[in-house]
């Protein structure tokens, strides 16, 4: 009887142990399912991140190309500005030179005009004096002839 009780006790212990193992197995299976779900989610997240990284890499390349083009255009624009500034400086020098030449020509013309005017005035004065003298001589001559005629 003791052996039977002992066997029953062992059987009961084994059944309890078996139930515990089944519970642990069930818990482990649930954890495996949760892990599989997590793995699927992480895999999807990883794929999404890879796609995003690829898209960002493409956008980065496009932006780098754009920046390169803009830098190139900026250099061309700067070169054009430098060219225009040089042309402006050259035109300013030419304008200044032309202005100086025009000023010199105008001064020479004014001086020449004044000289010509003085010369003409002097000739006018001389001819006027000469003409007045001739008139006076003719007047005297007429008066003399009139005096002789009476």
Image (cartoon, grey):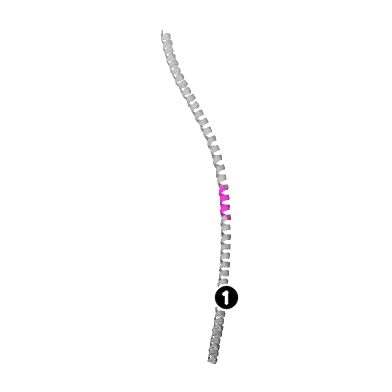
Q: Nearer the viewer, residue 65 or 34?
A: 65
- Binning the other alpha carbons within 10 Å of mark 1 as few (below 14), some (14 to 19) or many (20 upward) gives few
Residue ID at (43%, 16%): 19
Residue 13 position within the rendered picture, expressed as x and y whole percent measured from the top left = 42, 15
What secondary structure prevails in the magenta region?
helix
Question: Of 135 and 145, which appears nearest the observer?
Answer: 145
Task: Report how many numbered discs are placed on residues in the image.
Answer: 1
Task: Confirm whether the magenta stretch covers residue 59.
Answer: no
| Residue bearing the label numbered 1 | 116
Q: Residue furthest front?
A: 150
User: Which residue is at a point 48% across and 25% down the rendered structure image?
Assistant: 37
Magenta-tinted stretch: 73-83
What's the residue at 55%, 44% (across, down)?
Answer: 67
Q: Position of residue 83 (x, y in %)?
A: 58, 55
**Spot occupied by residue 135 in the image (x, y as percentages of width and height):** 54, 84
In the rendered image of this protein, does residue 42 appear above or below residue 63? above
The answer to if 80 sits in the magenta stretch is: yes
Q: Does residue 124 lie above or below 61 as drawn?
A: below
| Secondary structure beneath label 1 | helix
Q: Nearer the viewer, residue 133 or 13?
A: 133
Q: Residue at x 58, y 65 (%)?
A: 98
Q: Quadrant of the N terminus?
A: top left
Q: Residue 53 in the image: x percent, y percent?
A: 53, 35
């Amino acid at each position: 009887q003791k052996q039977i009780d002992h066997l029953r006790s062992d059987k009961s212990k084994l059944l309890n142990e078996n139930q515990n193992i089944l519970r642990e197995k069930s818990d482990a299976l649930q954890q495996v399912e949760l892990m599989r779900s997590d793995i699927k989610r992480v895999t999807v997240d990883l794929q999404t991140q890879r796609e995003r990284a690829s898209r960002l890499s493409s956008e980065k390349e496009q932006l780098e190309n754009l920046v390169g083009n803009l830098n190139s255009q900026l250099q061309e624009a700067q070169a054009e500005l430098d060219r225009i500034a040089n042309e402006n400086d050259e035109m300013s020098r030419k304008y200044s030179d032309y202005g100086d030449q025009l000023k010199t020509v105008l001064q020479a013309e004014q001086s020449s005009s004044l000289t010509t005017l003085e010369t003409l005035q002097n000739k006018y004065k001389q001819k006027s004096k000469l003409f007045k003298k001739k008139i006076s001589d003719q007047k005297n001559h007429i008066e003399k002839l009139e005096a002789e005629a009476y």
